[in-house]
């Protein structure tokens, strides 16, 4: 019985690691167009925000795209499916 539990734990850990890496890659790919559009439009149309927010570095944008879903899941956790 111990071997199957360990096998299940390894599969669960592998799935978690693959999901995290996939999520980070997807965040990186989604951040690319946002980064270029923000740095192109922000200086013109968002003149009222501080200068530091008008030219965001790329890795800060990627960090935001990774951090926002984590904060969302902490604030509003998934309850699971309801079964009767």
Image (spheres, rainbow, N blue to C red):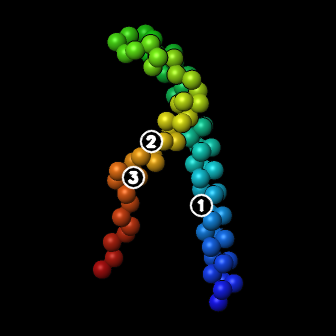
The residue that appears at 34% across and 53% down in the rendered structure is 76
The quadrant of the picture occupied by the C terminus is: bottom left
In the displayed structure, 76 sits above or below 62; it is: below
Q: Which residue appears farthest toward the bottom when viewing the image? A: 1
Asked whether disc 3 touches disc 2, contact meaning CB atoms under 8 Å apart, the reply is: no
CB within 8 Å, label 2 to label 1: no
Disc number placed over residue 74 in the picture, else none: 3
Q: Are there few (<14), some (14-19), or many (20+) residues within 10 Å of tag 1?
A: few
Residue beneath the point at 59% across and 45% down: 24
Q: Vertically, is 28 above or below 83?
A: above
Label 2 packing within 10 angstroms: few (<14), some (14-19), many (20+): few
Alpha-carbon span between mark 3 and mark 1:
17 Å
Total number of numbered discs in the rendering = 3
> Under tag 3, what secondary structure?
helix
Question: Residue 69 shows which numbered tag?
Answer: none
Circle on res. 68: 2
Q: Is residue 46 visible?
A: no
Residue at point 62%, 43% (across, down) = 25
Q: Position of residue 33 (x, y in %)?
A: 56, 28
Tell me the residue at 54%/25% (across/down): 35
Tell me residue 56's x, y (percent).
52, 22
Instruction: Examine the image and state in which quarter residue 5 appears.
Output: bottom right
Task: Decide which of tag 3 and tag 1 comes sooner along the chain.
Answer: 1
Distance, label 2 to label 1, CA atoms, is 19 Å
| 30 sits left or right of 45 in the view | right
Q: Tag 1's secondary structure?
A: helix
Label 3 Cα crowd, 10 Å radius (few <14 / some 14-19 / many 20+): few
Indicate the quadrant where residue 11 lies. bottom right
Locate residue 66, reporting x and y percent: 52, 42
Q: Is residue 76 above or below residue 43?
A: below
Q: Earlier in the sequence, mark 3 or mark 2?
A: 2
Residue denoted by label 1: 16
């Amino acid at each position: 019985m111990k071997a199957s539990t360990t096998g299940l734990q390894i599969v669960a850990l592998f799935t978690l690691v693959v999901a995290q890496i996939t999520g980070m890659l997807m965040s990186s790919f989604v951040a690319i167009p946002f980064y270029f559009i923000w740095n192109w439009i922000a200086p013109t149309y968002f003149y009222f925000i501080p200068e530091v927010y008008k030219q965001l570095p790329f890795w800060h944008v990627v960090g935001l795209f990774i951090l926002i879903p984590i904060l969302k899941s902490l604030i509003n956790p998934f309850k699971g499916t309801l079964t009767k």
